[in-house]
Structures are given as structure tokens and as C-alpha cells.
Amino acid sequence: MVSRLSYLPLVTDKVKKYFSRFISDSQQDGTVWFDYNGTPLKLHYPIGILYDLFQEEGSQPWCLTIHFSKFPEDSLVKFETKDLLESYFMSCLKEADVLKHRGQVISSMQKKEHNQLWIGLVNDKFDQFWAVNRRLMELNGEQECFKYTPIRFYNEDGTYIQKLVSPLTESGKKKTVKDLLDELSTPKRKAVGAKTHGIDVHSETHLQWMSEHLSYPDNFLHLVIYYESV
């Protein structure tokens, strides 16, 4: 079992150790990658969003193909060390804090606190991670919402878009998933649903609540958006 909140490169050491006796010496040092039904899985996407995107409903366990050679550099970002993934993760975390708090919280933290966030994620130690991350989820002063909601919208083909999203409507009310879906709809296709952590989110759920309670460790909401043709 692997955590939805983790990343595939963080589990490859166990994978390589298990399969080492079955692969040739020439492949022992190769970069491990995974595919599902022929689709390479993005190594910098949280495992949970990959599962939501590609797992066929009602089909368990999730059957992946593991590769030890022929890394598809045209479609995947290579993370040859955990340090590279850590740099990417911290970059996302800083971006999220800029959106929520203008970067004031993450910049006030010490290096050891940044390290604690990463180590807590790598070792799947929630208490260790949350002891620091809770500060990134707090509101400043009398604020009722973050400045913006860190959020990425995934299409069913695995691509995503990112846009500036306020947690409030123009009238000052807390924005809901329904409001968000209306914003994402176009004359040619209508956004009809959103999923995260394997849950179809209710249309009346507030974005602010979701940001505080359903964000991934990088402090972004990762939502699979479902569309219907108009």
C-alpha cells in the first residue's frame, strides 16, 4: 500500500529492491517509471490524483506496469534523486503560500521546518508534517478566506491547467464548487463535476473549506474536472 499523498519516486527504492533479482545488471541503475494501460504516469503528480485520473471505477487493485529502462523523456520529468523531487515540492509549497498569504508564512519559517515538512511526507508521518503545515493553513488576523485558492484542474486525459481563483464571488460570498464549475464551463463544454481524494465533491462545498481540509501536502487542491459537451 502507498499513500495517496506521496509521489511515485518516493516508492521506487522498495520497488527496485523487490525486483532487483529479476532485472539485468544493465538495468539496475536505470530510472524507474510506471505506466497504466500504456500511459506513462507523471512522476511529479501526487499518487492520489494519478489514481483518480486513471483507475477504472470498481477495478482494484490498481495494476501498473513498472519499467527499468527506456525512460520516456519526451513525456515525463525525470527525478533521478529525491533531492530533485524535494526541490519541486518546496517550489509548489512556496507558490501556494504566495497565493494564500503573499508568501509571508513560508518565508518566516526556518530551514529545519522546511526539512520537517519534507521528511514528514517522505516517511508518512502525519503528526510531524502537520506540526509545521498547520501554520500554512491558518488565516491571518480577521480574514475569513485566503487571498487566492491554490488549485490545479485536471482534464480526464491527465493534463492540467492552473488559473488564479478567488475563494470569494464578486458579491463577497464564499465561492462554492458550483460557482467554480460555472467559471470553468465554455460554450462548447459544461463542467459538471469535480473529484479529489477519490471523492465526488458536493456542488455546495466552499472552496475555502476545501483548501483548508482537502489540499495535498503541497498545499494545492488537485481536482479532476468532468465535462459534458453542450
Image (cartoon, rainbow, N blue to C red):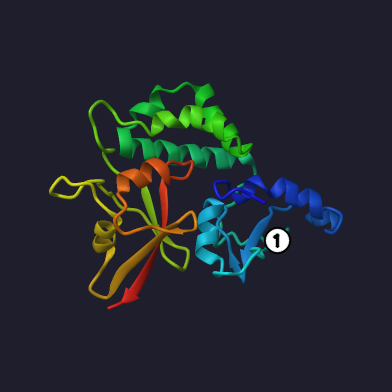
Query: Quick one: label 1, few (<14), some, or many (20+) residues within 10 Å?
Result: some
135 lies left or right of 20: left
The answer to which quarter of the image holds residue 97 is: top left
How many numbered circles does the render carry?
1
Residue 200, image x and y in percent? Answer: 42, 61
Q: Is residue 196 left or right of residue 39?
A: left
Q: Is residue 29 visible?
A: no
| Residue 5 to residue 177: above or below | above
Residue in the image at 33% along x and 68% along y: 192
Q: Which residue is nearer to you in this view: 167 or 73?
A: 167
Q: Is residue 115 left or right of residue 175?
A: right
Asked whether residue 182 is in view, the answer is yes
Residue 110 place in picture, x, y as percent: 47, 21
Instruction: Name the residue: 48% across, 37% down.
Output: 90
Q: Which residue sits furthest bottom?
A: 230
Residue farthest to the right, as pictured:
21
Name the residue tied to disc 1: 66
Which residue occupies the foreground of this view, 186 or 68?
A: 186
User: x%, y% of residue 138?
Assistant: 35, 31
Where is the C terminus found, in terms of image quarters?
bottom left
* Amino acid at circle 1: Ile
User: Secondary structure beneath disc 1?
Assistant: strand
Q: Percent from the top left, x then y, of residue 211?
A: 37, 44
Point 41% across, 45% down: residue? 220
Image quarter of residue 86:
top right
